[in-house]
Image (tube, rainbow, N blue to C red):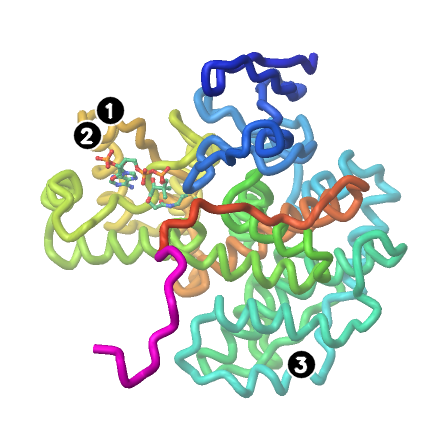
Amino acid sequence: MNGTVELIFDGKPLVLPTVVGTEGEVGIDIATLRAKTGCITLDPGYGNTGACESAITFIDGEKGILQYRGYDIAELAQKSTFVETAYLLIYGELPTSAQLAEFSGLLTDNEMLHEGMRHHFEGFPPTAHPMAILSSMINAASSYHPGLINAREERFPYHAARLISQVRTIAAFSYRKAHGLPSIYPKTTLKYTANFLHMMFSYPGEDCELKPEIVRALDLIFLLHADHEQNCSTSTVRMVASSRANLFASASAGVCALWGPLHGGANQAVLEMLEEIHKEGDDGTKFLTAVKDKTGNRRLMGFGHRVYKNFDPRAVIIKEQCDKVLAQLHVSDPLLDIAKKLEEIALHDEYFVSRKLYPNVDFYSGIIMRAIGIPMDMFTVLFAIGRMPGWIANFKEVMDDPDSRISRPRQIYTGATLRNYKPLAERA
Ligand code: ACO
């Protein structure tokens, strides 16, 4: 139940309303703080700041709980698919079979890129990172849909489906471009994840083999990444959406935020770290000593999380899947042995234990993607494909909220105070 809290400010009582979520977490509503006190709050990194109320995803970081629209991630991972979960996140309920068929139909209808977009791919140098291509191309795609104003319009379901479907086509095309390979068009007969693998690995006149265990593993990776409440990229999407920028522009900004190694780029950074440890003939012990000594500012990539202070439930599912996929494909990967050793040491080491640092979703996902044949610089792109439904759901929530205001934080200014302009000749 919502209530109030009484704080003491400057020796006097200050009463502020509280907002209580459906899972019991309490937020102090400070909307009137500045008017009442002349002060603002300061929370660099937003560790104590709730930016919105949201009904999409719930996380209890202390208990290691993650739920999409009230459904536990482990149950969805076991019983659902990425496409069904995407519908759940965006529209709030699991689809009926008619709704699912309509949604899947929309994804298929929108899987082709406008032919004009192929020219944009030609402009990128072969060295371009696929995340740069992805964010540019998503934004470029908005220019092919001039009716794309905001989610309130009735065409929102088409735009949402177009974005989920085309992000996968753009991703595959950018991989083919970077490797000098001909683009492979999507096939209407294939489902979402199988179609992505087809566009990645087939050749004109020679379709790749789509092993069901690989399709399922990748579908699961997409599903596990589909949303994660107010992380850096989702907050970015919401912030851009708050200015009423269109869906594609907001998602393109999300891709940029995801790219960094402290966020989605961690899956690539984990593999680079494991390769380096392997190259040096270390079993992980030397590396961990350097991390703990903070020499060279190194971190154990794929470990730690702002919210999880217990196991990331996605990491548990992915680790299990990793063992399964490698066994099914008869792959033995020395990097997996190093990863397991690092995890084993870290989970018992005082440095990591006292800071509550556990493996996150990125620690094992890269090893599965590598086993499937996905190149390392595409790892974060796959994360972006998976996260798209979550970004769209959050965009929709912003647009549907009649009380939504443009996001505009304040600051504490620490620069020079007022001074007079000095003519050039008088400056030292
Ligand atoms: N390796 C070693 N030390 C770490 C790590 C790590 N991976 N993560 C945090 N620490 C240490 C910090 O050095 C700091 O130590 P100190 O108290 O001695 O100064 C302490 O733990 C707290 O760290 P912060 O950086 O304040 O934690 P924050 O919540 O800001 O950062 C983050 C969270 C960015 C995820 C961090 O744990 C990290 O850099 N992890 C590695 C990168 C990574 O895997 N990112 C993916 C996150 S999941 C995702 O985005 C999908």
Residue 367 visible, this orientation? no
Query: To which residue does mark 3 refer?
Result: 117
Query: Which residue position holds label 2?
Result: 351
Q: Amino acid at mark 1?
A: Ser
Judged left or right of residue 305, residue 290 is left
Is 20 rendered above or below residue 228? Answer: above
Residue extent of the magenta highlight: 416-428
- Identify the image quadrant of the C terminus: bottom left
Task: Please tell me whether residue 424 belongs to the stretch shown in magenta.
Answer: yes
Marks 3 and 2, the one that precedes in the sequence: 3
In the visual, does 105 lie left or right of 350? right
Residue sitting nearer the eye, 105 or 301: 301
333 and 76: which one is in front?
76
**x and y, in percent, of residue 272 in the image:** 28, 58
Placement of the N terminus among the 4 image quadrants? top right
Q: What secondary structure do most residues of the magenta stretch adopt?
A: loop
Query: Which residue was labeled with disc 1?
Result: 354
Q: Is 141 a magenta residue?
A: no
Q: Secondary structure at mark 2?
A: helix
* Residue at 57% across, 61% down: 253
Say which quarter of the image contains residue 210: bottom right
Residue drawn at point x = 57 percent, y = 74 percent = 173
Write the residue at 55% across / 68% down.
Answer: 134
Amino acid found under the numbered disc labelled 3: Met
Mark 3 or mark 2: which is in front?
Answer: 2
Is residue 409 shown above or below 77? below
Tell whether circle 2 marks a residue whose Cβ is less than 8 angstroms from ligand 1: yes
